[in-house]
Image (tube, rainbow, N blue to C red):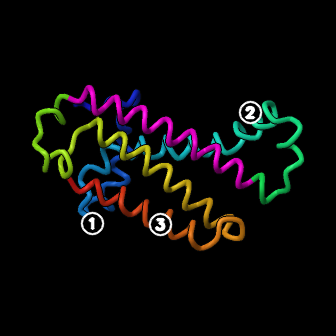
């Protein structure tokens, strides 16, 4: 399957990440860096301003009165909910419509590459970059467990660009 993302790779951005991709042996990373950046920007926009606006609208008696710590946690959970819903719906679509993946054997489905699976992986990577940044910026709210989780998940999804 050709990468179904609505934007084509951005040449200067792909070239910018090429040296790092070569050094870390991640040849598929330059093909999807624009999707990672898109995901990071999307999740950041959901965190602020979308979540506060939507949450304040739908929960006017509760959300505006939350303390700072609880509001940070609430907004982060909104991002997590949107991300998991978006990525799961797209992943199911790729599973059902990716003919390249359909022609793969069991091992190739786990270790192989297709443009659709690369897009899903990019959206996950963008989320875990966002999650890692949030865990660092709000360490007192999320703690060391969230930081470790974000770092490990980001590593796992980034290593997938080897294929």
Q: Secondary structure at mark 2?
A: helix
Distance (Cα) linking label 1 and label 2: 42 Å
Query: Relative to 82, is 87 on the left or the right?
Result: left
| 25 in relation to 100, above or below | below
- Chain part drawn in magenta: 72-98
Sequence-earlier tag: 1 or 2: 1
Of residues 89 and 26, the one nearer the viewer is 89
Q: Residue at x 85, y 56 (%)?
A: 67
Of residues 54 and 96, the one nearer the viewer is 96
| 145 in relation to 58, above or below | below
| 68 in relation to 82, above or below | below
Q: Find residue 24 and report its horizontal and vertical position in percent.
A: 28, 65
In this view, the mark in front (1 or 2):
2
Neighbour tally class for label 1: few under 14, some 14-19, many 20 plus, Cα within 10 Å: few
The rendered magenta stretch, by its main secondary structure, is classed as helix
Q: Find residue 122 and report its horizontal and vertical position in percent.
A: 39, 46
In this view, the mark in front (3 or 1):
3
Q: Find residue 129 and report its horizontal and vertical position in percent.
A: 50, 56
| Circle on res. 23 | 1
Q: Residue at x 30, y 32 (%)?
A: 94
Distance (Cα) linking label 3 and label 1: 20 Å
Sequence-earlier tag: 3 or 2: 2
Q: Please tell me whether residue 85 belongs to the stretch shown in magenta.
A: yes
Of residues 59 and 17, the one nearer the viewer is 59
Q: Which residue is mark 2?
A: 54
Q: Which residue is mark 3?
A: 151
Q: Find residue 119 and report its horizontal and vertical position in percent.
A: 35, 39
């Amino acid at each position: 399957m050709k990468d179904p993302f609505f934007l084509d790779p951005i040449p200067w951005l792909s070239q910018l990440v090429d040296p790092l991709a070569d050094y870390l042996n991640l040849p598929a990373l330059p093909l999807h860096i624009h999707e990672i950046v898109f995901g990071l920007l999307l999740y950041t926009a959901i965190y602020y301003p979308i979540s506060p606006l939507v949450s304040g609208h739908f929960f006017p008696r509760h959300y505006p009165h939350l303390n700072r710590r609880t509001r940070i946690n609430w907004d982060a959970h909104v991002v997590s909910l949107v991300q998991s819903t978006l990525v799961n719906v797209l992943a199911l679509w790729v599973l059902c419509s990716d003919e390249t993946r359909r022609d793969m054997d069991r091992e190739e489905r786990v270790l192989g590459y297709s443009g659709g699976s690369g897009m899903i992986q990019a959206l996950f990577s963008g989320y875990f970059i966002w999650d890692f940044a949030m865990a660092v910026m709000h360490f007192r709210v999320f703690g060391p467990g969230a930081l470790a989780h974000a770092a490990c998940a980001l590593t796992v999804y980034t290593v997938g660009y080897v294929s």
